Image: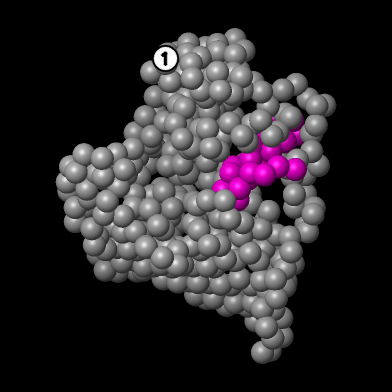
Amino acid sequence: MTSIAPLGNTSKKIRVGLVGVGTWAEYGHIPSFKLLPEYEIVAVMSRDQEKADAVAARHGIKYALNSLQALVEHPEVDFVVVLTPAPQHEAGIRAAIAAGKDVYCEWPLTPSKETSRELMELADKAGVRHIVGLQRRLAPGYRYVRDLVRDGYIGELRSVRLHISVEYFQKERTAKLYYTIPPENFSSLLSIYGGHFFDAMFTMLGHPNSINALTVNQFKEVTLIETGEVLKHVTADQIVMSGTFDNDAVLSVHFEAGKRNNYGVQLDITGSKGDLKITNTTSFGDAFNRIEGAQGDGQPMVEMPIPEMYNWLPPSDLGGSVQELTNLYAAFARDRNDGTKLAPTFADALVMHELMESIELSNSTGQRVTLK
């Protein structure tokens, strides 16, 4: 089974510069870096200097900048972390690559598969390490289930059922979620949540070889709560997908947005010898995944505590979604130090781009699509 010993202070600290200082930066990224001894945040950048100053002051960060070039070229920054909305990712990534700095970017990488591929090739040519924020695959529970499946706990895989219901992306949204509405921003339910959960599931179980998909837009208009502005909405808030794996195991998936109650995650994995289940009371938040399993016939599902060997992190009170991110940064520190390849890269983002295109193709043609 996979485990990682903490690096401690045996290596030079990775000095971080943050591009973008929104809610997720303060809720997720800054606490993650503070928890890990391998990192030090040395600079933050926002086009709003007052905002950069305030975040730097709250978190004891040395430099507050209002220029992307100033951040990526700063001599004390080793690692550029791009946290802006998806349409702005390209500019931050290009600047980091041009400066020869390792770069992290949130998922979705960019709205365009072609642009994402170009950026990956530029980074590889420049010898720049690149990672993408598909962090769920590195949560302890997902790693544990991956190893259970690999080691034969369920026998041969027979079926997989994933249900993701999201309390977000409702008909009424706060103004700060405006970027989720225009389709060209590639920041919809499918783009964001689909990318995160498909990546986690396929990392555990392998990729399907073919899919059928249906996408439905039930919310034709979205209202911004603060202003009452009503905007046209064309992206899907319901996605249903079926598929098969190479051994003819079957896959069924349902993503739904704007769910008022009883939302969260349920992943059921059925095998020839047993069953596994992953559940969570939210698709994004403080709650941690619950793992259950059973072997044999007619047995009750029993909670399976995650073994300590899967814990890569120092003790903390960080919630489940933040710890997923922290595990990604723990993995990247090991990649830099030991040459491992644990953290997801821009290549993994391209796999998700390809899947999104296949889902849209299947929906538009009504036909089954063979995956590469």
- Which residue in the structure is indicated by mark 1? 49
Position of residue 110 in the picture relative to residue 106 (left or right)? left
Q: In this view, does 84 lie to the left or right of 160?
A: left
Q: Where is residue 46 in the image (x, y as percent from the top left)?
A: 43, 20
Residue 31 lies left or right of residue 356; in this view the side is: right
Quarter of the image with the C terminus in it: bottom left
**Residue plotted at (56% across, 72% down):** 268
**Magenta stretch, main secondary structure class:** helix
In the depicted structure, whether residue 304 falls above or below residue 274: above
Q: What stretch is highlighted in magenta?
A: 315-339
**What SS does tag 1 mark?**
helix
**Residue 337 colored in magenta in the image:** yes
278 part of magenta stretch: no
Q: Where is residue 308 in the image (x, y as percent from the top left)?
A: 79, 54
Q: Is residue 156 visible?
A: no
State the residue in front, 229 or 344: 229
Give residue 259's position: percent from left, percent from top: 37, 62
Rendered view: 294 above or below 265:
below
Which residue is found at the position 50% from the left and 52% from the top?
Answer: 284
